[in-house]
Image (tube, helix red, strand yellow):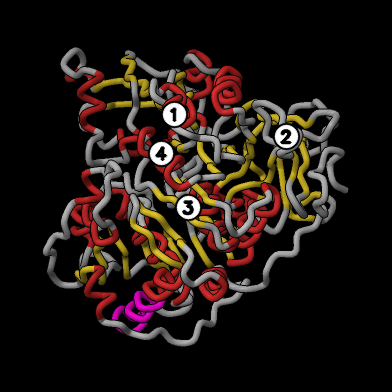
Amino acid sequence: MAAPFWPKGLSPHLSVPQTSVYYNLEVSATRFPEKDAVVFYDTRISYRALRQDVDRLAGFLQRQCGIGRGDRVLLYMQNSPQFIVAYYAILRADAVVVPVSPGSVTPELAGYIADSGAEVALVGQELFPQIQPHIGTTSLKNVIVAAYSDYTKTTDARVLDFVKEPRRALSGAGVTLWTDALAADLAPGEHRAGPDDVCVMPYTSGTTGKPKGCVHLHRSVMMTAATHNSWLGMWPDTVVLAVLPFFHVTGMQTGMNAPILCGNTIVLLARWHREIAAEMVERYRVSAWTNIATMVIDFLMNPKVGDYDLSSIACIGGGGAAMPEAIAKKLQDVCGLTYVEGYGLTETIAPTHMNPPARPKAQCLGIPIFDTDVRVIDPETLVELGPNEVGEIVCRGPQVFQGYWQNPQATEEAFIDIDGKRFFRTGDLGRVDDEGYYFLVDRLKRMINAAGFKIWPAEVEATLYQNPDIQQVCVVRTQDEYRGEAAKAIVVLKPERRGQVTGEDIIKWCEGRMDKRKWPRTVEFRESLPMSPTGKVQWRVLQEESALP
């Protein structure tokens, strides 16, 4: 049964296309061949041209790189037309997209390559130095390198330096320039992937520190893309501003897969920039924008925000972290817009909950979406709780992943049976009110939410333990004025190094060893850390002593 405030006119059940995600592009390119699929700093790419590049790249992947059904292919780029082309080309080749954060550095990439077994990667040229050491020394055999400037033309819009950088003359064993791959003009074979084939495998780290691939089928990816369009009333003439990173499931679904399913125009930014975003909204009459709270804060702090015509925006919302009440009010005052929040995880390829657009609640996860069963249970007894009782949020639905790649133990621990049904344990503590709206209260998992980017303390600790000056370390979450939360490292130095190493030294050491967003923002030195009788660091004690409970 749907919640009492289910969006008017929508059925509780959503009929999701029983096709591959690539087929969405084929349909939209057939329906709207000359329509703008992507606008990238004033460069317009039609649906026909987008599909042509996708098919040519898919042919190269199959015929030159030996990619076949179910093979994992690394996608390591900034937001760009090439990211979209690469993503859909991998799917057209019946393979699996393994999206990787462009902030990942060489040691982190080693883990993704080893775990996925990827033999091919599609890479932005500014990121090539990070992945180059792995070519031929790991399973990685072929790398296709893209220059974003190949998809930018003369424009009066401000373009970021790394976007307009000319194509580099890169070469070497296993290295192919993007332009050469397309120029080969190789036709792909028959497209055979269907709804039950693996589509995409984004990584999440969790409590162990080792990244885990979340296995999503075409049908689960299709589910949340179709949900986004139906729930928010998207139409083919909707113009979408895509600013969230595509490697992350929210950006992937709301900024790329849902718009292509609907036949929208995607106004694309390689990276967040508040002035460029405002220019693009005004220039292309953007009507829908999914973001995170920090982007809205930055956008509204622009002293020139009132100089832009933002009247075209009709739908704005997002997730990752709750929207502060004061910012939501300023958004209403400046733009006349109500922010619509949602909730989801990498394991659910974006939403399990969304607020009804006509009746959203502030700092609220929303209500369960189509065909999604959500419960709040006691995390110890697993007994279902009643309204306004705090417990772990568990869910089941067509968007839930199949499990963690080659990790049956972690998969088993992630699910429980309730009434003979398989539910995913989110690790988030929440409650449901008397009207069926869900609210986040706390977490069971050790996780830091830095402006929607998830940081797993165990992963950061594992890297910091490689520092020769560190004897012990515990990473906890602390308050950050801009990001909401940030990582804090509590460090015990080796006796001979005490008094000789600063917090700045520890932070500087992280460079080149982990994504910058994972670096501890603050470092506290101690003589010792509290230990349990079994010899484990009592991180909860240290967390309670930090700024956040």
Marks 3 and 2 in Cβ contact (< 8 Å) = no
Q: Callout 1: 10 Å neighbours few (<14), some, many (20+)?
A: some
Marks 4 and 1 in Cβ contact (< 8 Å) = yes
* Screen quadrant of the C terminus: top right
What span is in magenta? 55-66
Indicate the position of residue 233 as horizontal and vertical percent values: 68, 50
Q: Quadrant of residue 81?
A: bottom left
Looking at the rendered structure, which numbered label has been put on residue 277? 4
Callout 4: SS: helix
Q: Is residue 485 visible?
A: no
Which residue position is annotated with label 2?
A: 380
The mark nearer the N terminus, 3 or 2, is 3
Which residue position is annotated with label 3?
A: 212
Alpha carbon of mark 2 to alpha carbon of mark 4: how far?
A: 46 Å
Callout 1: SS: helix
Q: Amino acid at mark 3?
A: Lys
Q: Quadrant of residue 472?
A: top left
Q: Is residue 215 left or right of residue 4?
A: left
Q: Is residue 288 left or right of residue 352?
A: left
Q: Amino acid at mark 1?
A: Phe
